[in-house]
Image: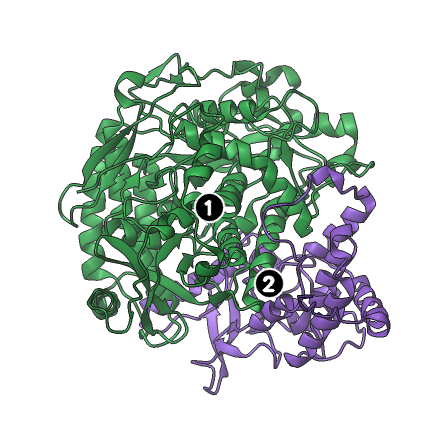
Amino acid sequence: MIELNSRVPDGPIEEKWDKHRFEMKLVNPANKRKYDVIVVGAGLAGASAAATMAELGYNVSCFVFHDSPRRAHSIAAQGGINAAKNYQNDGDSVQRLFYDTVKGGDFRAREANVYRLAQVSVNIIDQCVAQGVPFAREYGGLLANRSFGGAQVSRTFYARGQTGQQLLIGAYQALERQIALGKVKMHTFSEMLDLVVTDGRARGIVTRNLLTGEITGHAADAVVLATGGYGNVFFLSTNAKYSNVTASWRAHKKGAAFANPCYTQIHPTCIPVSGEHQSKLTLMSESLRTDGRVWVPKKQNDNRAPAQIPEAERDYYLERKYPSFGNLAPRDIASRAAKEACDEGRGVGPGGLGVYLDFADAINRVGQTTIAERYGNLFDMYQRITDENPYRQPMRIYPAVHYTMGGLWVDYNLMSSIPGCHVIGEANFSDHGANRLGASALMQGLADGYFVLPYTIGNYLAGLKHEKIDAATHPAFVDAVQSVKSQSEQLLAIKGKRTVDSFHKQLGHIMWDKCGMARTHEGLTEGIAQIQQLRKEYWSDVNVPGSGATLNQSLEKAGRVADFIELGELMCRDALNREESAGGHFRVEYQEDGEAKRNDDEFAYVAAWEWTGPDSEPRLHKEALEYENVKLATRSYK
Amino acid sequence: MRLTLHVWRQSGPNAAGKMETYPVDGVEADMSFLEMFDMLNERLTTAGKEPIAFSHDCREGICGSCAMMINGQAHGPWKGAATCQLHMRAFKDGDEVYVEPWRAKAFPIVKDLVVDRSGFDRIIQSGGYVSVNTGGARDANEILIGKDVVEESMDAAACIGCGACVAACPNASASLFTGAKISHLGLLPQGQPERDRRALSMVETMDLEGFGHCTLTGECQEACPKEISIDVIKRMNRDYATAAVRFVPAKESVGAG
């Protein structure tokens, strides 16, 4: 039975983190090397945590399924990273970043975590610059900033449209340095397939070597999951193809509560779907909304080319509905507004599933050269995919699944409901509430990895006795290895008629229709039944070719899709339970004048679900959210 | 459109490989090259055959995973694009397309089109970083860096580590990759203290890993999906030469008692 204790320190919010850092137990520097820590994943959160813990002296092993720790999906983040530096002298502060994040998350995040995030945001920029991250600069040599959605100050640091890449390369280089020093043992091509829990504590993982098929247990004193988000449950999303929920889901089945799985971010500016063959969706950075204006024709089914539609017949609907934030309204709001315009028959492009993002005014104002300098690589990317030139005609964009705010439940120390199993970055649920603001994912990943977990993990380790266990012989490891082997063998033995991808696409359709941008009681109930049926078919009719003793990409996918199917059902259940609209979760039944309607009296809580078995309903646990510093208010960007 | 694909198939690192031919119809101009491979793999699986293994992940040209030699060109015919960004409108009905893995001794084949690029990680391990531990960094704006300097550094830092430069080079040299990292860090004030050590060590590792020497053919910059210029190789050679003359390794300090 899971018990949720957030372990938020008492005292004024400004002092909680300092006080906590003082009160936490320390591990003596000479003793740190006696502790083994496993880090799974090497994106921003995993690489920064592994490097930092190794610098502190812990004995770190890091596991990734990629061929190199430089490939994780953090690398694709384009726009930037927020920090409350107030370099622009426009009124920013830790307090304001904190407030914007809580409000942006529609008052469904834990206050104390968000405040700490805002506090350490400034250290992240310092650290990254020291590593040699080439952030954009002004002519005088100072750092440049840009604006992002949901904020009225300019606090986003960027490196062209490749900010995630540059930050990840910084963390990767720090990690490689520790590998060279022998402080991190790196395991590439290794996929975590189970968490090993014994005596009520996480003591290691089971991995499959993707090249040889070998399944092995690895023991440690603590495990850190930095395994990213689960947007690919929709099949089509902006996530990289390998991004998956498997590590988190296997930990969930071992007792880690899964929190707020229904909070899904649908990003408003992606390139629309072009056909059934589509394998993923491509994001066009939100930063484009700084200079681009979103519009659709006022008339329904207006098939004229955009240039033929006069100004008076265009509806700049974000500027009309949200005059104070305009095109920089937060993502959930901008996405829903795009869906509404298309539902009204005013969408553009094939199938009417698109809206325009127009740079003509910006090009007239600052010139094409400046626009190219700001967004050149994004414009090139757009042209390659669509064969249209966005300097000459507006981009066509449509919302797509982009990020998942839900994830494994963690306390203030970033520890899950399984002692010793820590969860950082997108894989945890903690900081973004029901909606994440742009440029805050990079901030959270690096805050967790560089500045939070390396402290809090010491507090956990210092309380342990030194008891090494042998992964080769310990019964819990032997059992876990055996069960992973059986699952692989089972998948290979089904030899059904349908490919793994065909099931994944079908799951994606169900999720998008029933648990996408607009959800209803009826639709979610149908969705659950359809997913249960799909699960039965999957385990009797999937065709996984090849063997388990070699590189087998179909087998890798098969295990991940099996987990996505189970997760999909939980997402629908969570969405069904949450009878309100909040951030990325919009229930059609709960709205007022077309805007989302929260229900703070009944739903100001974190919904943390406990796994009770494949065929029984999960058990709901609630962590009440208390707001002592931010007044609960209707979120307005008007 | 209908294409004829000739693809390198190799079941494992030590197995003999050969080209196999696959006619593929129903290819649409809007598909990416990898989506065409997805379609072929779905058909192979349904027909009871083993699909073709290939590396990919982000499918937007930034993770550096994808790696295909297409009609003898690393990442295919489009300039400044990775394999995943290549779209089928680059081909026409009836085309024959030859697809091979990266060819280089330092990138051994794992299976089909998948190669082992861990040599790149070891080059970075030997010095491709600034030695700063987390914490204690000074305020970011205390380090002034001119806009032109940071832009030039960023041009080099844009490298995605895909290995196209090695695959395109007749000598299988990793000079563009190594030069890009040496330039990225060597141009910035943060990279100065370790500049000599970095150049010597990374160049040495590049040689030990079995990459060939650079003869400035320029094939690498033509193949690079981020269009990194061979100017970074000039910078690497200059840094290496300077360091070789003046670099004295720091003495380990011994306790004074």
Residue A521 drawn at (x, y percent): 23, 27
Residue B203 drawn at (x, y percent): 72, 73
Q: Which residue is mark 1?
A: A455
Three-letter code for the amino acid on which mark 1 is drawn? Tyr
In the image, is residue A241 above or below residue A144?
below
Pick the residue in front: A153 or B230: A153
Give the quadrant of residue B77: bottom right
Which of the chains bears the disc numbered 2?
A
Labels 1, 2: one chain: yes
Q: Residue furthest front?
A: B257
The answer to whether residue B92 shows anywhere in this view is no
Which of the chains bears the disc numbered 1?
A
The colour chain A appears in is: green
Q: In the visual, does B32 lie left or right of B51?
A: right
The answer to whether residue A201 shows anywhere in this view is yes
The mark nearer the N terminus, 1 or 2, is 2
Residue B112 drawn at (x, y percent): 48, 75
In the image, is residue B169 above or below residue A396?
below
Judging from the image, the colouring scheme is by chain
Q: How many marks on residues? A: 2
Q: In the visual, does B243 lie left or right of A251?
A: right
Q: Which mark is residue A469?
A: none
Dot 1: within a 10 Å radius of its alpha carbon, few (fewer than 14), some, or many (20 or more) residues? many
Q: Which residue is mark 2?
A: A177
Pick the residue in front: A134 or A303: A134
The colour chain B appears in is: purple
Dot 2: within a 10 Å radius of its alpha carbon, few (fewer than 14), some, or many (20 or more) residues? many
Q: CA distance from mark 1 to mark 2?
A: 21 Å
**What residue appears at the point 46 percent right and 73 percent down from the top-left corner?**
B22
Question: Is the N terminus of chain A in the top left, top right, bottom left or bottom right quadrant?
Answer: top left
